[in-house]
Image: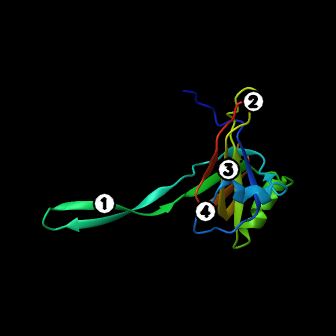
Amino acid sequence: MTIYATNGTRVYIGGPLAAKSADFVFADFSAQTALWTEIGEAEGLGTVGDTSTEITFDAIASQRTRRLKGARNAGTMEIVCGIDAKDEGQIAAIAAEKTPHDYAIKLVLNDAPAGGTPSERYFVAKVASAAEQFDTANSVMKLNISLWVNSNIVHVDAAEA
């Protein structure tokens, strides 16, 4: 078993890509190749992945709550960046927040085997917020980007050379 550090992971925003009722596959992101723009100065990437909504039913006779799985929700990914007014990825995320569209998002993990390629994650999300955080005198000013994930997460595994 091998584990990896988050450091070295990169996050990219692509162009608009509408959510769909079926799960996305890697090929659905092929038209984004020329559009990927790295969101620079990322400090934190938050979490992403499906959680089922809980549906409960309280049965009187058995005196037992039954649980069922409802709709799946891939969550909100909270990206924290040091503000860089000239960073093209931050500029793209701020612009995306002003639209109603879903955007293609790509993560490239820092887990490539020697000479190989790293794991990647792909999904679509609405940029729900792009808020500046200023804090105290000895702090770096931050851009907090919230992504409402509207699709499954497509996993591409790391590959040997």
145 or 155: nearer the eye? 155
Q: Name the residue under label 4.
A: 148
Mark 2: which amino acid? Ala
Nearer the observer: mark 4 or 1; the answer is 1
Q: Name the residue under label 2.
A: 161
Distance, label 1 to label 3, CA atoms, is 35 Å
Distance, label 1 to label 2, CA atoms, is 46 Å
Regarding mark 2 in the picture, which secondary structure is present there? Answer: loop
Nearer the observer: mark 1 or 3; the answer is 1
Nearer the observer: mark 2 or 3; the answer is 2
Nearer the observer: mark 2 or 4; the answer is 2
Check the picture and name the quadrant holding the C terminus: top right
- Is residue 67 visible in the rendered image? The answer is yes
Point out the residue furthest to the right here.
86
Return the disc, 2 or 3, that comes first in the chain's sequence: 3
Nearer the observer: mark 4 or 3; the answer is 4
Q: Decide: few, some or many residues near mark 3? Use Cα within 10 Å; few <14, some 14-19, many ≥20.
A: many
Q: Name the residue under label 3.
A: 80
State which quadrant residue 61 falls in: bottom left
Name the mark on residue 67: 1
Return the disc, 4 or 3, that comes first in the chain's sequence: 3
Mark 3: which amino acid? Val
- Residue drawn at point x = 69 percent, y = 73 percent: 100
Regarding mark 4 in the picture, which secondary structure is present there? Answer: strand
157 or 70: nearer the eye? 157
Mark 1: which amino acid? Arg
